[in-house]
Amino acid sequence: MPKTKFHGVIFGLIMSYSMAYGMEVYNVAIKQGLNTLAGGLSNMTNHIFWDAAVEASYMGLFVFIFSNLWGNRIGAALASKHVSPEKDNPYICQLMRQACTVGIMCPTMSMVASILFNVILAGNSPTQLPAIWVGTVLKNFPMALLWNMYAAAPLTHLLFKLIFNKK
């Protein structure tokens, strides 16, 4: 885990971009309608990974900024109301912090995506933003939680260890 401010920034960047990339793969596949086809997301092609990388290149920056402004702090504060590192299993504490952080960051990033992709780029009326945002949160939250717990966080920890624990 990060021990210095620099380590924290690197850890945060890896986590931000791994979350952004995973969520963009999911959202690009849905945007292309793969979830409506027989076979669903199993119809993905390699092109989706490229399109997701393009979108993740800037969405990852938004994730990094908003997680540092409030996502990580509020997530940690919410988790501390449910678990205590002194009393509870460290793994359970970590999972609770991840879940609480996703609970803050998913609505945040869903708002960013709704404004950017649905209002600005797609030209939908800003008066529809509340409905678009709620729909985006409902679509993204289950994936964000699972992606964070089973892919992004383990990958981030692995990469962080490979970078900083060279012995």
Image (cartoon, grey):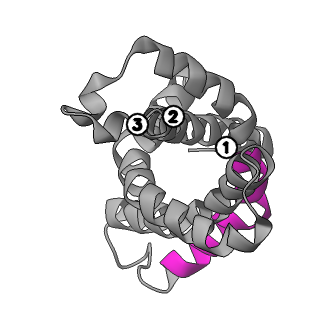
Amino acid marked by disc 3:
Gly
For disc 3, the neighbor class at 10 Å (few under 14, some 14 to 19, many from 20) is few
Q: Quadrant of the N terminus?
A: top right
Q: What residue is at 46 percent from the left and 43 percent from the top? A: 153
> Of the numbered discs in the image, which one, if any, rests on residue 150?
none
Q: Which residues are magenta?
A: 62-79
Which residue is outermost to the bottom? 81
- Seen from the viewer's position, the closer of residues 127 and 55 is 127
The residue beneath circle 2 is: 28
* Element on which disc 2 rests: helix
Can you see residue 57? yes
Can you see residue 102? no
Q: Quadrant of residue 14?
A: top right
Q: What residue is at 70 percent from the left and 35 percent from the top? A: 10
Q: Nearer the viewer, mark 3 or mark 2?
A: 3
Q: Measure the alpha-carbon separation of dots 1 and 2.
A: 24 Å
* Element on which disc 3 rests: loop
The numbered mark, 1 or 2, whose residue comes first in the sequence reads: 1
Q: Taking 89 as reference, is 154 left or right?
A: right
- Seen from the viewer's position, the closer of residues 31 and 142 is 31
The residue beneath circle 3 is: 33
Amino acid marked by disc 1:
Gly
Q: Nearer the viewer, mark 3 or mark 1?
A: 3
Q: Main secondary structure of the magenta part?
A: helix
| Residues at marks 3 and 1 touching, judged by CB atoms closer than 8 Å | no
- Seen from the viewer's position, the closer of residues 108 and 162 is 108
The residue beneath circle 1 is: 12
